[in-house]
Structure formats: C-alpha cells, structure tokens
Amino acid sequence: VSSFHLPSTASFQILTRHHANPKSSSPRSTTSSLQMGLGEMEVLEYDVAIIGGGPAGCTCALYTSRADLKTIILDKNPATGALAITSHIANYPGVDRTMSGTELLDQMREQAIQYGTRYEKAQVFMIDVKEEETGDSTYTKCVYTPDFTIKARSLVLATGAMGRVGKPFPGETCMMVPLPRGEGRS
C-alpha cells in the first residue's frame, strides 16, 4: 500500500491487482482500489493500454491480444471519428461498398474482443508515462479516467486525426515528421 497527495490535498491510497490468467480480460487476482474522499476508484493492471477505439486501436488490440498480452481499449465515444461517421466504405480492401463505417468499426472492435481485448467506453483525462511519476517499475504507464485507473506496461496512443486539441506531448512532433524514402522508425 502506498499513498500520495495531490496539490488539492485529496489523498489517494493504491492497492494493486495481478492478472491470474493471461487469456482472461478480467482484472488481476486481488482486489484493487484507489480510495478518494468521494469513494473508491478501481485500479486495473494490463500489459497494453490503448487510448482510441478506431481502426488503429482495434488493429493494435487484435495483435496484442493474439500475442497473449492483456489488452484494454479506452474509447471516449465509438460513434465519433472519421470511420464512424463515414456513410459507406469505398476504398478498403475486402469490404463491400455498401458497408458503413460504423459497421466496419463494429466488426473490428468485436474481433479484438473475441481475442480477449477488454473494451471500455471511457474519457481519459490524464496519463503518466515515467516510473518516477507512477511509482511502479513494472507498470510504468498510468491512464486516468473518471471511473478507474489503468496501470500498464505499454501505452498506445491511437487517437485518430479528428478533434485533437492542446499541445503535443513531449516527443510527439518528432514522430510525425516525414522520413526520407527507405527510412523508418520502430
């Protein structure tokens, strides 16, 4: 058990949880909670946390879940985004032209879920990405939502191209610079 204080003097107490079965998307074996003055907040541990439930997030989740990594998708709203508002898909291989973007997105999400991904509709309001910030050497990424906190080994930002506001996070702009032909980043 560890406690820390926020500048607003709200006190939190963190208890951890561990996954018992790598194929199960349920939280790890012992109960966890983040206790605040207003109630308890659940803390869940995953290998991979994906922020964004569009095509990139669902594809990532499909691959990580198939690789037996505990994966969760946090999607603020499945009805928003470029694909969700597309009336019909005309240029995606293997997809009938009569299929809507919402139908394709539903199929992608369901396929990831079938392989063990946990899908949650949740608004992310803050992330911590350094061990010094999270206080955990194993789960070094923390994602905060109004209802629960995710501690993860890896964090994937798949937030799409629509509706982005605010300043880029440190290092984001250098990852978006086009590279000369034949060069890549991993």
Image (cartoon, grey):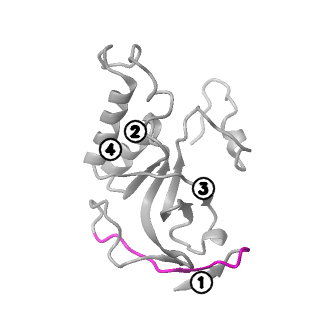
Circle 1: element type: strand
Q: Are dots 3 and 2 in contact, CB under 8 Å?
A: no
C-alpha separation, residue under disc 3 versus residue under disc 4: 24 Å
Circle 2: element type: helix
Q: Position of residue 61 (x, y in %)?
A: 39, 46
Disc assigned to residue 125: 3
Q: Is residue 48 magenta?
A: no
C-alpha separation, residue under disc 4 versus residue under disc 2: 7 Å
* Amino acid on which disc 3 is placed: Phe
Q: Residues within 10 Å of mark 2 (few under 14, many from 20)?
A: some
Circle 4: element type: helix
Question: Which range is magenta?
Answer: 7-20
Tell me what residue is drawn at x 50 percent, y 32 percent.
81
C-alpha separation, residue under disc 3 versus residue under disc 1: 21 Å
Chain-order first, disc 2 or disc 1: 1
User: Which mark is in front, 3 or 4?
Assistant: 3
Disc assigned to residue 112: 4
